[in-house]
Amino acid sequence: MATGITRDQTTGASGESYDTVAKILHWLIAAMVVLQFVLANLAEGAEDAGSKFQQLVLLANHKSVGITILSLALIRLGWRFMRPPPAPLPMPVWQSRTASISHWSMYALIVLIPLSGWMFSSAAAVSVSWFNFFQLPDLVAANEGLEELFKETHEILANLLGVLALIHLGAAMKHTFVNRDGAIRRMSSTLTLALFVIVIVLGVLGLTRVGRASETPMDRLLDAKTSAAGLPQWRIDYTKSYIRFIAEQAGATFESEWKDWRAALYFDAAHLDVSSFDVTISTSSVDTLDQERDETLMEREWFDGGNFPQILYQAASFSPRPGGEFSASGEIQIKNVTAPVELMFSVRQDGDQRTLQGNATLDRIALGVGTGDWEDTTWVGQFVEVKVHVEASIEGQDQD
Ligand code: HEM
Ligand code: HEM
């Protein structure tokens, strides 16, 4: 069927080719969309492997790139209205209609997908930051129902974009190699194609590696296989290990867990003098099974998670106790208060497997957790029971 469309019928002021700004925005966004799929998949892989830290970093980068796409998409749409694109290439009407529908769907998706991600993060009570430079406002209040809804929406829309982009790629290839109508040339220049490749390569190299630049002192500790004294580091299975605490609120106890923590443990019953524990807990990873209580705990009077993102625990003084148990005299640092803490624990050895069970009592008043009105221990108990369970293996040990 004749289309009635010819190359001469250009509507835009930009002639046959897209203008440079349109080209740059197209290829920059296309590269970032590719990156988004890579980052989301790696984050999922990190979650499956039980590496919460890697998952956190990959998802944080995914969110920052996604917010960048949202901003660029809005600029691109604004630019398109100001500088209309060239007339479509000559092709059957059904094809140009399909192309137009698919292009507009892709425009809609590169706005709606980041928005649904942002809504999803807000509903999950995880505020979004742009590359740690500034924090974005929450779009909705924390709500588990909405979280589930936006999560589903985000996934479905992202998959839809994936399918459309593949069809779009196929169409571009057909135009270029079968119709030979210069479709790719209209949308690109050497510079913009180079930009596309560079953004993907640099993005994959820089954003997917939970790299050295963002390495914390804890990461460096975890990297070590043995301590200075030659003790092997425990390789912890975080999926089977936990740090929980039991506290009392209005006369009733509740159990909570810190979901995200890392520990460099060196322990050998025969070498207590050179054994050591180093633990870093992500303050905001507290889960009391109650969203409101979790949020309260992040406030200034409690753990002040915004200003003090980590809780630190260290112990380097160990002594044996009756019944084969041990006691570790260490220190815990919450906010800017450091207090001594005594951890009682037992260690079961089974080949190269180690299981540590321990408990400690913390005085929340001495630690400045729950200040002001909250110091009234009638409503929130003064003592908090911490329960630790660690399952680990050790490699390359030189047992003697
Ligand atoms: C155009 C931009 C974006 C694209 C193409 C995109 C794509 C994806 C994809 C493909 C997934 C994996 C979904 C699955 O499990 O099947 C995902 C997951 C996720 N995205 Fe995005 N995303 C974008 C922007 C954002 C933004 C702006 C945010 C937040 C501010 C965000 C937050 C998330 C989160 C938290 C997950 C993990 C979901 C889970 O826990 O399963 N995304 N995204
Ligand atoms: C990576 C492979 C890609 C190739 C080879 C490619 C190629 C092209 C080409 C040749 C055009 C111009 C069509 C014409 O002559 O009218 C175009 C337009 C377009 N592309 Fe892509 N593209 C790719 C990825 C993407 C992605 C991932 C998106 C989604 C964000 C996207 C969104 C668009 C949109 C919305 C237009 C229409 C521009 C307009 O007329 O306003 N492209 N693409």
Image (tube, rainbow, N blue to C red):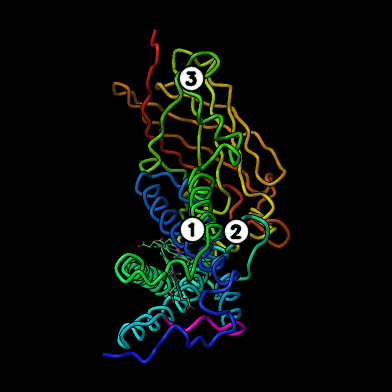
> Image height check: is 107 above or below 195?
below
Q: Residue at x 61, y 56 (%)?
A: 131
Task: Give me the disc on residue 288.
Answer: 1
> Image height check: is 263 above or below 197?
above
Name the image quarter holding residue 396. Answer: top left
Residue 82: say if magenta. yes
Mark 1 or 2, nearer chain start: 1
Q: Mark 3 points at which residue?
A: 226
Mark 2 or 3, nearer chain start: 3
Instruction: Locate residue 310, reporting x and y percent.
Output: 61, 45
> Image height check: is 82 above or below 267?
below
Span shown in magenta:
81-88
Choose between 20 and 98: the one closer to the eye: 20
Choose between 137 and 317: the one closer to the eye: 137
Instruction: Locate residue 195, reporting x and y percent.
Output: 54, 56
Task: Give me the disc on residue 297.
Answer: 2
* In front: label 2 or label 3: 3
